[in-house]
Amino acid sequence: MAQNLRSRHATRLAASAQNGPARSKLVGPDENANRFTGNNGGKAVLGAQNTGAQRRVALNDLSNNAKKVNTGKAAAVGKVAISVNPQRVPLQQKGTRQVGVPDSAPVLAQRTTRSASQNENERPAIAPLPKRGPLRKAQSEAVVPPPVDHEMAIAQPITFDTEIQVTPLESIPSPVVEEAYDEEDSMEADEYDPEDWLHLSPDRLARSEAQVNSIRETFKDEVDEWDTTMVSEYADEIFAYMESMESQCMPNPDYISGQTEIEWSMRTTLVDWLMQVHMRYHMLPETLWIAINVVDRFLSKRVVSLVKLQLVGVTAMFIAAKYEEILAPSVDEFVFMTERGYERDEILKGERIILSTIDFNVSSYCSPYSWCRRISKADDYDIQTRTLSKFLMEMTLLDHRFLRARPSLIAAIGMYSARKMLGGDWTEPFVFYSGFAEDQLRAGHELILERLVDPAFESLYVCRKYANKKFLKASVYARDWAKANYQPEPESDMA
């Protein structure tokens, strides 16, 4: 047995002497690095073929021992530094460890990455809150009242010799009289205000209110008790609450007079751009209405420069999207919308300023779409009337004159104009569900027709948006109808 093993070993040694030394199955680091070199003097060559046998990486090589080394210059393609003795790297915070990033980064990367030092120099850091210990102790020591001696004698007794002078009632101004006087002045000012298209003469207003009240008393609302989604048993209370909240979210209709650099035409440009952003990211219709309402309410209280006007618009859209959307766009996407005209920190800071200015009052606003759904019950939710009314309501966002109108009135004007264009009448069901008579809607209908026949209206995005087949080409039909039937009424009829 031992003699056979010695003979086999001698045979193998003789064969190895003739054929040369056998190649080791395990390749060391030096031999493994030779796979990346060709016949160029040991230098790495892009695309060089490896003629030697390759091996699979062992399990103990699955560590960070093969990384590009940043030597201050751009690393050559193909050079890999392999660490023989891998070491464990401690956990670090995100963004503090940069491995293998060349100094000459691309232009896009240079624009998107900003160092911490630059941010600190350009944006002041928020001051830290004071420590609790010494401050709270000092305050507590300062506010401790001295002990009270209840048995302490009074040095000077209280006397009632002081005479009280009573002012005659005739000389005291009456606040009721002043309020009545101010109300009369405001009524006279509104009567001669040419911009107030909502004003009606007392006779027309009395007739309209009497018509609405009589229809509400006699009209019978057919309630579908089996349709649980419409919550018909609570509908009256819901819309009564929405009507009471409308006045809290109304902007100043003449806030442009308090601005120094902004005009109404610039607001139209901003709203047109917001419509494009809204359509590009497929947001809900309510998001657009909330965003523009936030913009108008903010501009009613704060003076904004022209450079920051787009920042106000994109921040308002960011707030409305977070409030209304299920999957809202991120801050980085809103930065991309402005073509990096504003940074991430500016949008977040603007969000805090806008919300604090409007007292975080966002949920009180109800868009005209909620009222339009209720009015659509009068014609059994006709798709053509409703689509056309959506286009006409969205038109009012571009016209600053409709800042005076409440959302419920805008919905009624949109439905009334759609019914007129499609050959319908403003019947009792429409008066019942909208709460407005025909006389109260004619002035707004005339403003819509005036805007439709304007040649510049065709260049706005809302006209191109609703010219699509998806929206039944509502803008094309409305413009053609307005050009054929619009006749401005004299001012005497509108008074």
Image (tube, rainbow, N blue to C red):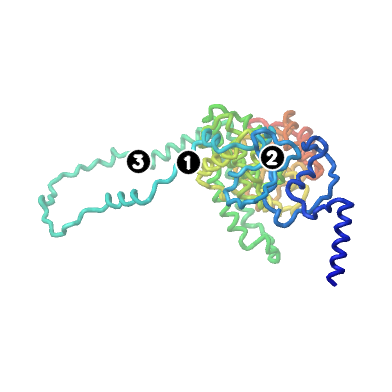
Tell me the residue at 85%/72% (across/down): 1
Tell me the residue at 63%/31% (across/down): 492
Percent from the top left, x then y, of residue 336? Answer: 67, 38
Residue at which label 3 appears: 174
First in sequence: mark 2 vs mark 1: 1
Q: Nearer the viewer, residue 352 or 229?
A: 352
Tell me the residue at 84%/50% (across/down): 53
Give the residue type that dot 1 points to. Answer: Ile
Badge number at residue 126 = 1
Q: Is residue 25 left or right of residue 194?
A: right
Give the residue type that dot 3 points to. Answer: Ser
Residue at which label 2 appears: 277
Tell me the residue at 55%/45% (across/down): 249
Q: CA distance from mark 2 to mark 3?
A: 54 Å
State the image quarter where residue 50 is shown.
Answer: top right
State the image quarter where residue 470 is shown.
Answer: top right
Give the residue type that dot 2 points to. Answer: Val
First in sequence: mark 3 vs mark 1: 1
Q: Secondary structure at mark 2?
A: helix
Q: Nearer the viewer, residue 472 or 165?
A: 472
Q: Secondary structure at mark 1?
A: loop
Q: Secondary structure at mark 3?
A: loop
Residue furthest out toward the front: 3
Comparing labels 2 and 1, the label whose residue is closer to the camera = 1
